[in-house]
Amino acid sequence: MTGAILKVMILGLVRDRGALAMAFVLPPMIFIIFAAIFSGTSGDEMRLKVAVLDEIGSVETELLIAAIDDEPALRLQQTAFADEQGLRDAVLAGKADVGLILRGQLYGEATEPPVLVIADAGRAMTGPILAGHVQRLVARDLPGVSMRRVAPTIEAMAGGLSPQQKAQLDAAIDAMGQDDSGEASDADSDVALVGVETTAGRGGSVTISYYAGAVAVMFLLFSAMQGAATLIEERTSGIIDRVAIGRAGTDVIVFAKFLFLTLQGLLQVSLIFLVAWLAYDVDIPAHFLAWLATTLFAAAAAAGLALVMASVCASRQQANTISSFLVLVASAVGGSMVPRYMMPPWLQDIGWYTPNAWAIEAYQGALWRGDSLQALLPSFWPLAASAIAGLAGALILSRFRLRLG
C-alpha cells in the first residue's frame, strides 16, 4: 500500500509542471543568482562603476586614470564632470557606484589627501573598496609616485641625505619612467594618499529607506498575485459568464480588480512606510507627494502584471505556483533581497526588466535623494508601462477566454 501511495504521489508531481518547477528549477535558479552576487563581491565580477574628476591633469593622474580603466574590477564612467558637485550628484543619484576626485599632486607637500573617494551612504562599502584599488594601482603602475612619497621618511630615518645621495635617489626614481620633473619633495609624507568621504542623502537612514522600498515592492507583487488569482475562481464558477451578459462584458470585472489591487497595494505599502517613519525616522512627510506617486505607480504595475498572469493561467494552483516562481526570481534579480550594486554588471542589466528595480530606484530618489516628481519620471515610465500593458493584456485574454467558453 505504501508503495502504491508513493507511486501515485510521484506521478502527481511529474504531471504537475508547476510543482516540478518549484521543486527542481526554482532552487538552483535562486542559488545561481545569489552565487553570482556573492562571488562577485569578493572578486572581479562586482566591477564598480567609477566616476572620475581630474582637477590636476598631470602625467601621474592621467596614468592613474588609465590604470583604473584597465582594471577588471572597475568600470570607468566616461561622463566628464565640470566640477566636484557634479560628480557628487552623479554618485548620489546612482549614476555611478563611487566617485574619485584627483585634487592634488600624488606626491609633494599637502595638507589633505590628494585623492578623494566619494561614496554614497547607501553604498558605503564602495569607498574603502575603491580606495584599496587606488592604493594598489599606484604601487603597481606608478612606482615613482610611491617612492617619492616615502622618500622623506627614508631620509628622516637615515638622519639626512647628502646632495649626492639625493641626486642618486632622484635619478633612480626618474628611471622608473613615471615622472619627468626630477623634483623630489621634502614634505612630510604622513598625509594619506587616499581619503574617503561618505555623502549623505536627505531622508534619514539610507539602509532603512532602501529596504522599506525593497520589501514593499516584493510584497506588492505577492499580494497582487494572490488577489488576481480570484479572477480564475470567478471564471471557473461561472460568475464571469453571468456578468459578461451585460454591456461591459468581462472588462468591468478586470477594471474593478485592477482598482482594488492598486488600492490594496497603496494601503499595504503605507503600513510599511508608517513603521519606517515612526520607528526608524524615515522622513515620509517631507517627501510625501513623491512617495505617494511612487507607491501608486508601483501598486498599479503589480496589479497589472498580476492580472495578466491570472488571465493566462488555467487554475488557481497553477497561478499560485507560477506567481511564486516569478516574484521570487524578480525580487532576487531586481534588488529586493540584495542591493543591485553588489551584483555583476550582466545581472544588473537583467534587473531592469523587473518592476522591483524601477520601484526601488524611485523610492530611493524620493526618500533618500529628495528628487522632485519630474526627476522621478524616468523611474515612473517603466512602472506605468507595466501597469498599462498588464491591464490591456488581461482585458484581451479575458475576452478571448469568454469567446472560447
Image: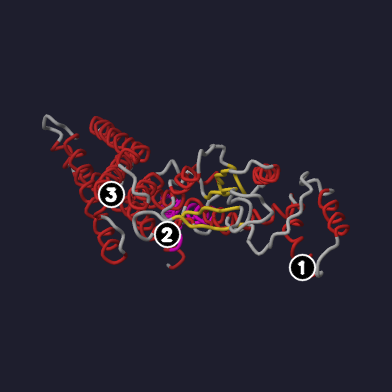
User: Mark 2 is on which residue type?
Assistant: Met
Decide if residue 142 is on the left or right side of residue 328.
right
Residue 383 magenta-highlighted: no
Q: Residue at x 65, y 49 (%)?
A: 105
* CB-based contact (under 8 Å), mark 2 and mark 3: no
Instruction: Look at discs 2 and 3 and give the one toward the viewer.
Output: 3
As rendered, which of 317 and 346 lies closer to the eye?
346
Q: Are marks 3 and 1 in contact (CB under 8 Å)?
A: no
| x, y percent for residue 280 | 32, 65
Q: Does label 2 or label 1 sit earlier along the sequence?
A: 2
Say few, some or many: other residues with alpha carbon within 10 Å of mark 2 (under 14 / 14 to 19 / 20 or more).
few
Residue where numbered disc 3 is placed: 291
Residue 283 located left or right of residue 125: left
Residue span colored magenta? 6-32
Mark identifier at residue 156: 1
Residue 198 image label: none
Give the labeled residue for mark 2. Answer: 9
